[in-house]
Amino acid sequence: MNGRRSIVVFTVDDQRGALPLRVVDRAVRAVEVTPLPDVPELILGAVNVQGQVLPVVSLRRWLGRPDRAIEPEDHLLVVHSDTGRLVLLVDEVCGVVEYEPRQASPVSEAVSEIPAGCELLDLADGLVLVPDLERIKAASEAAPRATGASTEAMAAREPSA
């Protein structure tokens, strides 16, 4: 059996990141994000993905990078975990790469610029940060779920995400 694993590599500013391919449902060009009131700082708002309203998390904020406006060239990664789905805003999706598990290393807690729970992958073309999706998801849990008229209004404007 092949021990290689597949990841989806993306960028946020000059930081390369990745997520296991098995948790990524799709990658699409950015669409308009509907702002939501009283949500955690990481949440930009919500988008409608095939009739399901999902929170959009800014990986830029999660990495402690300055905000910027969403650009048409940006991408949305629709991801899932055991506890649900969410959307991650990234600058670019670079593609799918295979790696050997021995290339993964936990990030030292001494590296304060990198969020806790991440791994680093040492790929042939440099290091890639693998964020802990469950920690990101936990930060988005406080986002209110759209209900009633809000859900219907978003479903009526369903973008191609």
Image (tube, helix red, strand yellow):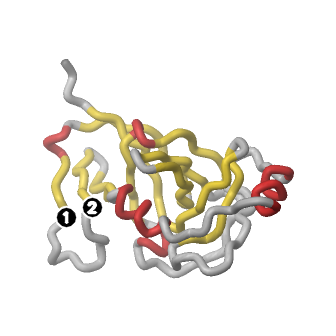
Q: Amino acid at mark 2?
A: Cys
Residue furthest front as drawn = 148
Residue 27 position (above or below residue 120): above
Find residue 70 and report its horizontal and vertical position in percent: 67, 68
N-terminal label among 1 and 2: 1
Find residue 79 and report its horizontal and vertical position in percent: 50, 47
Left or right, 132 with respect to 79, comes to left
Q: Badge 2 is on which residue? A: 118
Q: Residue at x 67, y 56 (%)?
A: 30
Marks 1 and 2: CB-CB under 8 Å?
Answer: yes
Q: Which mark is residue 29?
A: none
Q: Residue at x 52, y 79 (%)?
A: 41
Find residue 92 and report its horizontal and vertical position in percent: 54, 54
Task: Count neighbours of disc 2 (C-alpha within 10 A) and say few if under 14, some if 14 to 19, many if 20 or more.
Answer: some
Residue 33, by quadrant, is bottom right
Residue 29 position (above or below residue 101): below
Find residue 140 and report its horizontal and vertical position in percent: 49, 66
Residue 149, by quadrant, is bottom right
Task: Count neighbours of disc 1 (C-alpha within 10 A) and say few if under 14, some if 14 to 19, many if 20 or more.
Answer: some
Secondary structure at numbered mark 1:
loop
Number of residue marks: 2
Q: Badge 1 is on which residue? A: 107
In this view of the protein, which residue sits in the foreground, 50 or 7? 50
In this view of the protein, which residue sits in the foreground, 132 or 15? 132
Q: Residue at x 31, y 71 (%)?
A: 115
In this view of the protein, which residue sits in the foreground, 110 or 39? 39
Q: Amino acid at mark 1?
A: Val
